[in-house]
Image: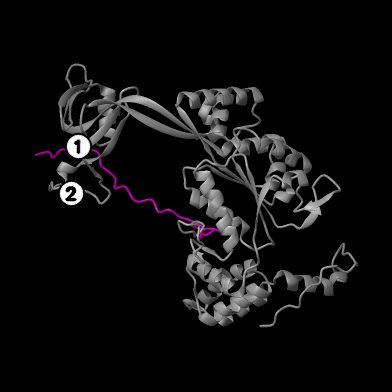
Amino acid sequence: MISPTGPKIREAKDVTRIERIGTHSHIRGLGLDNNFGVIPVADGLVGQVVARRAAGVIVQMIKEGKIAGRAVLIAGQPGTGKTAIAMGMAQALGPETPFTMLAASEIFSLEMSKTEALTQAFRRSIGIRIKEETEVIEGEVVDIQIDRPTTTGVKLGKLTLKTTDMETIYDLGQKMIESLIKEKVAAGDIILIDKATGKISKLGRSSTRARDHNVVGPNVKFVPCPQGELQKKKEITHTVSLHEIDVINSRTQGFLALFAGDIGEIKTEIREQIDARVAEWREEGKADIISGVLFIDEVHMLDIECFSFLNRAIENQLAPIVIIASNRGITKIRGTNYESPHGIPLDFLDRLLIISTTAYSEEEIHKILQIRSDEEDVDLADDARQLLTKIGKEASLRYAIHLISAAHLVATKRKSTQVEIEDIRRVYDLFVDVKRSTQFLMEYQQQFMFHDSTQPTQQQADPMVL
């Protein structure tokens, strides 16, 4: 007796998602309650009560659609959490709101003009939610019959679907049969068929089959049997950015240009036609405009031409919320000999809502280091964390955070699961901070090439002693 042999089915293995721990990977939101009250330690943020409350107000106005074409400046000294607050705003807005991050220096490194690079960044931050009605067939699969005639070899079949009110039999062609096999549709599944494209989507398993003795996986979703007619009209929503529409309409290869990366400059005429078409869709109720956020870090790196462009761009009808950050004081505007606060022209500075950040206290630094050590899965001893807090206060918070992973590696080498105070001392001796490096240069500057013999005007603090 010959046993039937079918094609071997390989077991699908779960894909393990590998995530690197970034500088702001611990940020989950702004840490506010429903009344814009700041929770001292929440969502990965610590302190900065006034700045977080102000950012929460901006986020709420964006969600309600009451703010558009505005610009916000987050200003403060280095290491006070400006980028962290911007990342918290992105998390609070959710995945539906477009959020584009851009470093100001990127404008000058792209192979296109500065204004074109800014325009593309603006249009990436504007989302278009397109609505369309399509006819679909939705129901529970009662039976599937597939026949292969011996003469033609073409597969034919019948599909029986039902709702709570009716039941119908449909004739199947070869393409529909292949789609059903590909989706592994079986009796008891709830499916959705797009009549225009023939695409089959499996919505889940019928809740009436929940007590069947068939073995089901943990990810099986049970849904109730649809009601009413089998054929119905359904509204489908697609969300794309204006920049994606620009690329699709400006290249012969269409949407494939998004993956090729060779976008280049887009003609103004194409953008004007797209804006007119989007305005028509909006009036007809076919599309909604989602005003997103464009975050430009280190904004003092922009020159006077970029600021002149931003002055006009934020007044456009299709303009996102522009959030910029700077850690500069009174400095020169790039491209000019004039000085201005934060390196931003006064006429553009007058258009901004300014959020200020302040230096962290020693207690706040201690809590931030605890959050970062938990994020990096590093067990710090209490005395080691106290020493890191002292380093963060007297040197810099960034330097103290960098020492966590280095000390963890040193502790692992001596086969310890906990970072002790001697591990911190060892990496502190191996890696110098800015103040110790500056003092070293001042003492041995004669031995370096191209040294400047003039003494620095900024008074450097003495290195701390451990």
- Label for residue 150? none
Q: Quadrant of the N terminus?
A: top left
Magenta residues span 1-28
How was the colour assigned to the protein in this rendering? one colour
Residue lying at the far right of the rendered structure: 453
Q: Depth check: give the residue in front, 451 or 106.
A: 106
Please tell me whether mark 1 sits on a helix, a strand or a loop.
Answer: loop
Q: Which residue is mark 2?
A: 215
Q: Depth check: give the residue in front, 4 or 62.
A: 62
Q: Which residue is mark 1?
A: 225
Q: Main secondary structure of the magenta part?
A: loop
Position of residue 64 measured from the top left corner of the image (x, y, whole percent)? 49, 43
**Residue 80 appears in the picture as rendered:** yes
State which quadrant residue 176 falls in.
top left
**Local crowd at mark 2 within 10 Å, few (<14), some, or many (≥20)?**
few
Please tell me whether mark 2 sits on a helix, a strand or a loop.
Answer: loop
**Residue 147 appears in the picture as rendered:** no
Q: Amino acid at mark 2?
A: Val
Position of residue 152 measured from the top left corner of the image (x, y, whole percent)? 21, 17
Position of residue 158 measured from the top left corner of the image (x, y, whole percent)? 17, 24
Residue 13 located within the stretch drawn in magenta:
yes
N-terminal label among 1 and 2: 2
